[in-house]
Every structure is written in structure tokens, then in C-alpha cells.
Image: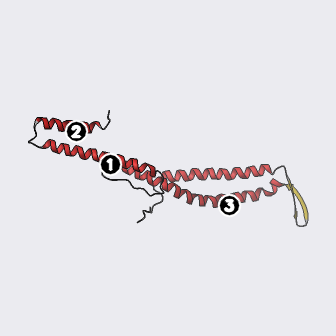
Amino acid sequence: MKSRRRTYFIKKRFQSEVILKIALVWFLGVIFGTAVLYFLSKETITAYYQGGNLIMKSTSEIILRKMLISALINFFVTIALGIFLMLFISHRLAGPLYRFEKTLEDMIDGKVDFQIKLRKKDELVDLVPKFNELLKTYNEKIRELKILVEKLKEEDLSEKERESIVSQIEKELNFFKTR
């Protein structure tokens, strides 16, 4: 069965900021393009007929209103499509970030007996094998330490056997580099 997310705003603040920043850049691009066209057409003259009269005006003066209307229509149509697209793109990033955040919270709570799964098209999917390797390694080390502690609890151990188990525990613990 395919894994589908039903909630598209997973990390609302992150996704909203991405969408707003891209929309702002988009809007500035539309305004800049309109301004460039306006200034480039400023030094040209256009002739047209209006009510049987031949009228000559600066091209920029004639097309300014239409350029602004066109730019606004262009902006709102492309921004609507862009927001829809950006929501899905940011969703493919926010979902994995959320999963990694929850994984770290689980690890802080001492849970390391699971594997992370992401969808194939999600961003950051390349990190999953390393996260899973980390979880597997920690799970194995902790399992080994628990076994050694249980052995240490046995009453009929000789001093030499206890020293051997303590040495093995120290070896397992030395895997973890701490300050």
C-alpha cells in the first residue's frame, strides 16, 4: 500500500516562509520585468487610430496601463499555480524533516528499536540509510550491554568471569565518545 500524507502543511512555519519568500521573489520579478519593458519602450513612438483620428504617443504611455493589468493577471495566475507547486515541493522536504525530528525525539527518550521509512520521491531520502545504520548500531550496543549486565547479576560467577564481563561492558561503552 502506498504511503500518502493527508496533511500538506506538516511544518507550517517552514513551509509558509518558503512559499512567501518565493512569492515575493516572483512578484518582484514581475514588477521588474514590467518596469524594464516600460523604460525600454519610453523612447519609441506608436501611432494608432482612435475615433478616426491618427494619434501619436510614447509607446510606454500607451501600453503602461495594459502592462500593469497584464503583469497583475500574470502574477496572480502564476502565483496560484506556484503556491500549489511549492506546497508539494516543500511537503517533500518538510515531511522528512518532521520524521527526522520525531526520530531524534524517540532516541532522546531511549527508543532505538525501529527503522525510518520515507517515500521514494521525498527529499533527504539519502539520509535514511545512515539514520537506520545509527539506530541499528545503537540498538545492538544497548542489547549487548543488557545481556552483559544480566550475566553480571548471576550469583555463581567467579571473580575472573566478573572481571571479563566488566571488561566487555567497558569495551562496549568505550564505543561511545563522551566528554
In-front residue for pair 110/2: 2
Label 3 residue SS:
helix
Which residue is the site of mark 2? 169
The residue located at (81%, 57%) in the rendering is 62
| Among the 4 quarters of the image, the one containing residue 171 | top left
Q: Nearer the viewer, mark 2 or mark 3?
A: 2
Looking at the rendered structure, the kind of residue marked 1 is Lys
Quadrant the C terminus occupies: top left
Q: Is residue 97 above or below residue 170?
A: below
Residue 27: numbered disc: none
Q: Answer with mark 2 or mark 3, whichever residue precedes in sequence.
A: 3
Q: Nearer the viewer, mark 1 or mark 3?
A: 1
In-front residue for pair 25/114: 114
Q: Answer with mark 2 or mark 1, whichever residue precedes in sequence.
A: 1
Q: Residue furthest left?
A: 156
Q: Is residue 10 above or below residue 108?
A: below
Quadrant the N terminus occupies: bottom left
In-front residue for pair 44/4: 4
Crowding around mark 3 (Cα neighbors within 10 Å: few <14, some 14 to 19, many 20+) is few
Which residue is the site of mark 1? 136
Which residue is the site of mark 3? 73
Residues at discs 2 and 1 in contact (Cβ within 8 Å): no
Residues at discs 2 and 3 in contact (Cβ within 8 Å): no
Q: Residue furthest right?
A: 53
The residue located at (57%, 58%) in the rendering is 83
Looking at the rendered structure, the kind of residue marked 2 is Ile
**Cα separation between marks 2 and 3:** 70 Å
